[in-house]
Amino acid sequence: MSDTHAQSVAFVRDTEIPSAPPPYAATGPVKWMRENLFATHANGALTLIALYVIWYVLSGAVPWIFNGLWNTSSLSECREVLDGTVGACFSVLTERWNQLLFGFQYPEEYYWRPTLAFLLLGVAAAPVLFFDLPRKMLAFTAIYPFVAYWLIWGGTMLTPIVAFLGVAAGAMVYKRFVTGSFALGFFGGIFAAFVVWNLGGFLISDTASDTAMLGAVPSRDLGGFMLNMMLGVTCVSLSIPIGIALALGRQSSMPLIKWICVVFIEFIRGVPLITLLFVASVMLAYFFPPESSLDLFLRVVIMITMFSGAYIAEVIRGGLAALPKGQYEAADSLGLDYAQAMRLIILPQALKISIPGIVNIAVGLFKDTTLVSVIGMFDIVGMIRGPILASTEWNGVYWELLGFASVLFFIVCYGISQYSQWLERRLATDHR
Amino acid sequence: MKKSVVIGALTAAGLSAGAAAASTLEDVKARGSLNCGVSTGLVGFSSPDANGTWQGFDVAVCRAVAAAVLGDPNAVEFVATTGKTRFTALASGEIDMLARNTTWTLSRDVDLKFTFVGVNYYDGQGFMVPKELNVSSAKELDGATVCIQTGTTTELNLADFFRANNINYEPVPVETNAEAQQQYLAGACDVYTTDASGLAATRAAFEAPDAHVLLPEIISKEPLGPLVRHGDDEWGDVVRWTLNALISAEELGVSSANVASLSESANPETPEINRMLGTEGNLGEMLGLNADWAAKAIGAVGNYGEIFAKNIGEETPVGLARGLNGQWEDGGLLYAPPFR
């Protein structure tokens, strides 16, 4: 066969043809564009429309931003300098940045205190967020809330110390009794903390704050983005343990606890947050005598925490329900008591499932903190809508101020969302 | 109120209502500061400046009362209230008085159980149109599109006005003043209507204020004034007569510049000034205040005319004319009862 074949072929090529470059239209950016942007007539049209929209937005926004003014003293001066050309008036940010960040009443010489508290927040949150860090750092996390309270509000040092002792006493009582009965330990701990706080309250004289190392700042003077951060961080970190407790309580076999939790969750979820805030600012004032009224900041924290606690409880209940029954039975068969079973086996799995839901609520909650502006608190939106836009110099500056607020919120919310994605990847133990 | 957050929270429930029984005047004196409710921000009327100090027309009333009662115009805790929280803040005792461009109406006075102690600004609903429309009276607005904030009394006033004059209009509902500003400038409506002082402030923020005119018609009555709770008439008298002192001072020619020399000794030619400034008679004692209460108030913030000129008068960006808010001798409505 090979002979006949050899005679029938006039020329045998003994080297391979060098591969020619692909046609121009089938490679590089042209190919990419043909495949991704202009694959069909409809796609091509959409691409052109999208390009036009992008150009339209940028042609307006870019000169507006780069032509912006940063050091005039009023909007009318901005307009004079710009003289009809397009340009932003960012001067409002340079003049009022301290009001946007700290509110207009926080004493200027104390700005370092919330700033330091903010930096320390990073140190305190790090071991909770990134569990590869040394566990010893958690000790600082435990005392951070009291340090931050002292830094921001100032006043006598005894207040945060008593508060800390109360929490410590509660934890000790919990540890002591939890082996006997989880409920006894849990409620005994809460009770012990209250006893210590009440006793401690008598130790602190009303004038103790006047001579304190850090000058006292009343809650009414807090404001700006600082207030949003404080409300967001406090309420998220308080509502997660409360949410866990409510979710476990709802599954409890004790009817009283179960029904208290069910009624609480269903009631709070059935009421809009804004209603709760109005109750906090308006209704509670009727219930207390004028001189002993609860601090407004605290009232708002309680309401927002209750609100997000109820939502987080439902998310965690979803996580609990997703666990196979075998996990509960496995814990029982090992002879673990309720607290151990929850802590070692059930919750680590249930919380992992619940992460996206919890983060979702945390992001929503953080943005909901701007709602406090409707009850007369000067958070960043309250500062913009009230004092700054009502000043004769800056009345009429909308885009620059609200844009600045959105940038701040975007940074924080995007950060939270990126962290949660990292956490999900890090905790992924299932086989894919 | 010195109770700290944590402890305050825990002990609040246990505290009894011991302090609530005393009168407001005694409370204020004991506390050493006046809790005064103001707007969260309204151009010219109340807003904090770059240093965080409250400024404005309503704020001046608070400062005058603090100066009269406590001798110090800065002894005021300003409590910012929104349109929704203002009445409960006053009723619950969180604030001692409210000076927040609040219209005096029968239901607020009677049903909500407040006492309006007087009027510090006579407002009314007006119209703003672009100059190029060449409209000189609201009655020429037949067929116009009108930007109007929904859910306010201005909406009802507008309907009444157009029906009474038998002309038509097309409403463009907007939610807030900021939105109205944008809609009006974008040409979505020919006319914008709201309170005249608000229109003036809005126009002041425009890029070209001169291209817009306020029409002469004022179609509603909006007397704005400070108010206190029912049931404490002594305190109501203090606030009422502080306001009257500011108004009388302008009428009698007492200003922040000359109040110090006028109150040094009684001048036999001006008995009413003497009685007001406490160099003669015992009017201050009757109110439960020091004899120099009015002198302190006027010295701190100036007389009514000075307050008006400084915050919302024609020299300021808000640029309001005195109009109805002139003294009765000049054809205005300000008519303070005599100091006698």
Image (cartoon, coloured by chain):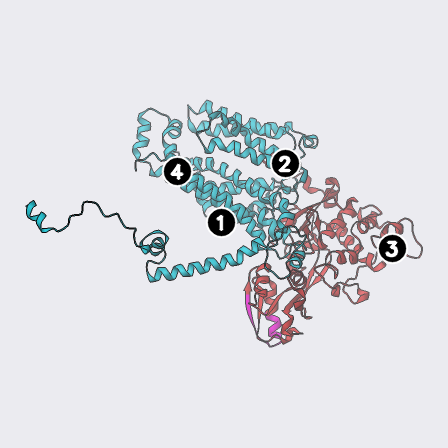
Q: Pointers 3 and 4 in contact (CB under 8 A)?
A: no
Q: From mark 4 to mark 2, how far is it between C-alphas?
A: 36 Å
Disc 1 target residue: A272
Please state which of the two labelled residues, at mark 1 or mark 4, is closer to the viewer.
Answer: 4
Q: The magenta stretch spans which residues?
A: B159-172
**Label located before the other in sequence (4 or 2):** 2
Along the line of sight, the residue nearer the viewer: A295 or B47: B47
In the rendered structure, are the residues bearing label 3 and label 2 in contact, judged by CB atoms less than 8 Å apart?
no
> Are the residues under badges 3 and 4 in a single subunit?
no
Using a 10 Å C-alpha cutoff, classify the residue at mark 3 as few (fewer than 14 neighbours), some (14 to 19) or many (20 or more). many
Q: Secondary structure at mark 2?
A: helix
Looking at the rendered structure, the kind of residue marked 4 is Glu
Residue type at mark 2?
Trp
- Left or right: residue A154 versus residue A19 is right
The chain carrying label 2 is: A
Discs 4, 2 touching: Cβ within 8 Å:
no
Q: Is residue B183 above or below residue A27?
A: below
Any part of residue B220 in sight: yes
Q: Residues within 10 Å of mark 4 (few under 14, many from 20)?
A: some
Disc 4 sits on a residue from what chain?
Answer: A
Colour red belongs to chain: B
Secondary structure at badge 1 equals loop
- Chain A colour is cyan
Give the label, 3 or 2, closer to the camera: 2
User: Could you confirm whether marks 4 and 2 are on the same chain?
Assistant: yes
Which residue was labeled with disc 3?
B273
Label 3 marks a residue whose chain is B
Above or below residue B187? Residue A323 is above
* Residue under the point 53% across and 28% down: A140
- Per the model, the C-alpha gap separating discs 1 and 4 is 30 Å
Is residue B328 left or right of B213 when viewed as pictured? right
Q: Quadrant of the C terminus of chain A?
A: top left
